[in-house]
Every structure is written in C-alpha cells, then in structure tokens.
Image (cartoon, rainbow, N blue to C red):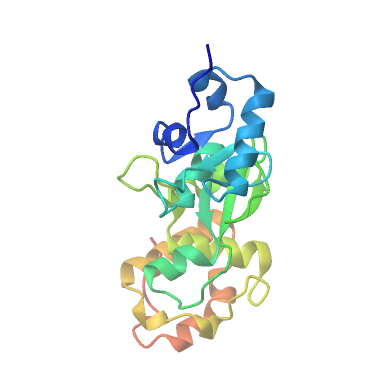
C-alpha cells in the first residue's frame, strides 16, 4: 500500500504564524533529520523564513506573509527589549530610522545573531536598572521597549552623543512634554548620567524647556 503524499501547503496550513523547527517532530512524527530536510526545502521554495542564527524559529510566510519579527524574536529570546533609536522614533522624538533596530537581551539567557535586529547581551544589573523605564505593550506577545527618555539616557551613557548614531540636534526637543523632560531627568538619575552635562545643548535647543523645572 502506497503512502499518501502530503503537500507542503497542507503541512504549513497546520502550522501557526511562527513555529520552532523542533515542533515538527511532535506535530508530524518526524525525526530531527527529516524535519531539517523539510525546513531546508521549504526555505528554498520561499514558503518559510528563518529568524536567523541558531534560534530554530521560523515564520510561516506562505499563510502569514506580513511578518512581525518582534513576535518571532520574543519567541526565541523572551528577555528581549527594544532599545536605542527605535523607541525615540516611535515616540516622535526623531525621524532617524535604523535599518536594524537594537534590542537588549539578558546575557545569561539564550540569545542569537539574527537578521531583523542588532542584539546586545546585557548583564542582570543593567536589566534591573532599566526595568523602571519599560513600556509594556497591552497585547500579549509584543516586545517591551524602553520609554524614549530611558532609551536616550541609556544610549548616551553607553555610547555617547555621536557614537549612538544621534547628535543633540537630531532630536525634536520641542516635541517633548514636561512629563517627558521629567522622565529624562529621572532616567539620568537612575542610570548615573549627568543630566546638566549631557543635555545642556538640548535645553538650549528646546523652546519649551524651563530651566527651573524641578527634578522628580
């Protein structure tokens, strides 16, 4: 009796938007070698796309062509946090766009070199310090991000103006509310950044900055 041939379309129809290669062994009863052969064949035909590295996470692009790599990244690296310029862009602080946004992950947890993001393994003490500045999306499975004030203070501390990809005049300081200025002051305090030294030019550029704004 001949074995029934199941098409790639029928197989992938049974899979969610994102899946692990190891899931195939359970779902279809394959061993790891056969699963690897199918993954290679599907990738070669453009039916799936891998997150990259040794993450073993894949996007089911045949049935879900609009890929949100943030979800796939969280699946591979649950400690991932969006940092750097991207939180500032999303908040309207700058128009700068990174080709590959930055994310931070706990250095003692699984992390991989992946195509959609620059991955920065960070120590536990850093994760604790920035936890107060996290913005947690209400939708489950979405990547947390540093609030823009905290992302900026962190960049300036780690890389300095210019080195982080931004100069003070690259930001729309007039777009910041007094609450955001206060958050920036507070982030600088927590992260041991000298606000008066690092942001004096920013204060000069901002028309709505009040020099006597009290620190929180």
Describe residue 198's horizontal placement relative to residue 59 as left or right: right
81 vs 75: above or below? below
Q: Residue at x 66, y 43 (%)?
A: 112
Residue 112 vs 99, above or below: the answer is above
**Left or right: 49 as drawn, with respect to 180:** right
Residue 185 seen in render:
no
In which quadrant of the rendered image does the C terminus lie? bottom left
Name the one closer to the observer, 57 or 122: 57
Whether residue 3 is situated above or below residue 168 in the rendered picture: above
What's the residue at 42%, 53% (across, down)?
A: 65
Q: Position of residue 63 (x, y in %)?
A: 39, 45
Q: Which one is nearer the viewer's eye here, 22 or 187?
A: 22
Return the x and y of residue 144 as percentages of the image width and height: 43, 48
**Where residue 108 sits in the image (x, y, percent)?**
67, 35
**Going by the picture, which residue comes out furthest to the front?**
1
Residue 117: give x, y in percent of width and height. Answer: 59, 56
Horizontally, residue 153 falls left or right of residue 123, namely: left
Q: Quadrant of residue 193?
A: bottom right
Q: Residue at x 58, y 63 (%)?
A: 100
Does residue 35 show up?
yes
């Amino acid at each position: 009796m001949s074995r029934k041939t199941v098409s790639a379309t029928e197989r992938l129809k049974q899979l969610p938007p994102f899946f692990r290669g190891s899931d195939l062994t359970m779902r279809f009863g394959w061993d790891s070698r056969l699963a690897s052969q199918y993954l290679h064949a599907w990738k070669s035909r453009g039916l799936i796309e891998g997150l990259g590295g040794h993450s073993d996470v894949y996007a089911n692009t045949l049935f879900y062509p609009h890929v949100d790599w943030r979800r796939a990244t969280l699946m591979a690296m649950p400690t991932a946090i969006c940092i750097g310029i991207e939180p500032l862009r999303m908040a309207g602080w700058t128009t700068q766009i990174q080709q590959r946004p930055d994310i931070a992950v706990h250095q003692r947890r699984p992390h991989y070199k992946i195509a959609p993001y620059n991955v920065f393994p960070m120590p536990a003490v850093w994760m604790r310090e920035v936890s107060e500045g996290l913005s947690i999306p209400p939708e489950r499975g979405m990547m947390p991000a540093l609030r823009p004030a905290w992302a900026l203070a962190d960049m300036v501390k780690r890389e300095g103006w210019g080195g982080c990809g931004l100069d003070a005049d690259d930001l729309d300081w007039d777009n910041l509310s007094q609450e955001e200025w206060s958050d920036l002051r507070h982030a600088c305090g927590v992260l041991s950044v000298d606000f008066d030294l690092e942001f004096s030019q920013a204060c000069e550029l901002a028309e709505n900055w009040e020099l006597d704004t009290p620190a929180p």
